[in-house]
Image (cartoon, grey):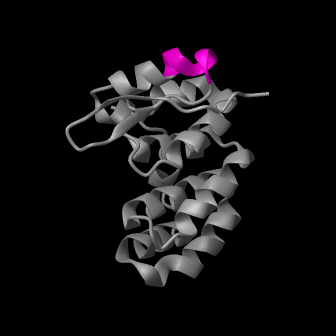
Amino acid sequence: MILLYVTTAKADHNNHKEYYPGGAEFTETWKEFYAGDHEPELDDPLIEAGKAMTLVICEAIKHKDMRYRRYAIGALGYIGDMRALPTLEEILKSKEEIYYFRGDALQAIYQIDKSLGKKYANEYAHEHKYLEMFQEHMQMQSKWLTAPTGN
């Protein structure tokens, strides 16, 4: 059983908060994630922790004010754990979410389940140009959609 409590730490200049769900087992991974300063590598600590992090990342990204939320959403796609799908679907389907969080969730869904990602891309493409862009690239099977993050 994974403990899913949330604590907050310092807020950054944009009033985003650092969430540390999952208890002591995951604290060092979260600290490393939030300490990152090189954009292509921000999600690396979460990805390296693997499927053990899936549910705690899902808990953290439910907070719309999470610092580096986009990178945590993206990490779920690279981890590839089906257990992330309900949380990612919730973000994608919510019209209250900012379009780029919805697009990040769509890309992560596609990375986990290509056919489901394409289905959602077709369903939601009309709602924003960013989502439409993902639909087009999924149809073309663009490699960047699933390529590992890096320098």
Location of the N terminus (image quadrant): top right
Q: Position of residue 57 (x, y in %)?
A: 57, 38
Q: Position of residue 7 (x, y in %)?
A: 49, 29
Horizontal side, residue 82 vs residue 133: left or right: right
Location of the C terminus (image quadrant): top left
Q: Position of residue 115 (x, y in %)?
A: 69, 66
At horizontal 59% and vertical 56% (from top left) the residue drawn is: 88
Q: Is residue 147 visible?
A: no
At horizontal 60% and vertical 15% (from top left) the residue drawn is: 24
Horizontal side, residue 86 vs residue 126: left or right: right
Q: Residue furthest left?
A: 13
Considering depth in this image, is 118 or 98 the residue closer to the camera?
Answer: 98
Q: On the image, which quarter does residue 22 sit in?
A: top right
State whether residue 44 is above or below residue 138: above
Q: Position of residue 45 (x, y in %)?
A: 49, 24
- The rendered magenta stretch, by its main secondary structure, is classed as helix
State whether residue 58 is above or below residue 25: below
At horizontal 60% and vertical 52% (from top left) the residue drawn is: 111
- The stretch in magenta equals 23-29
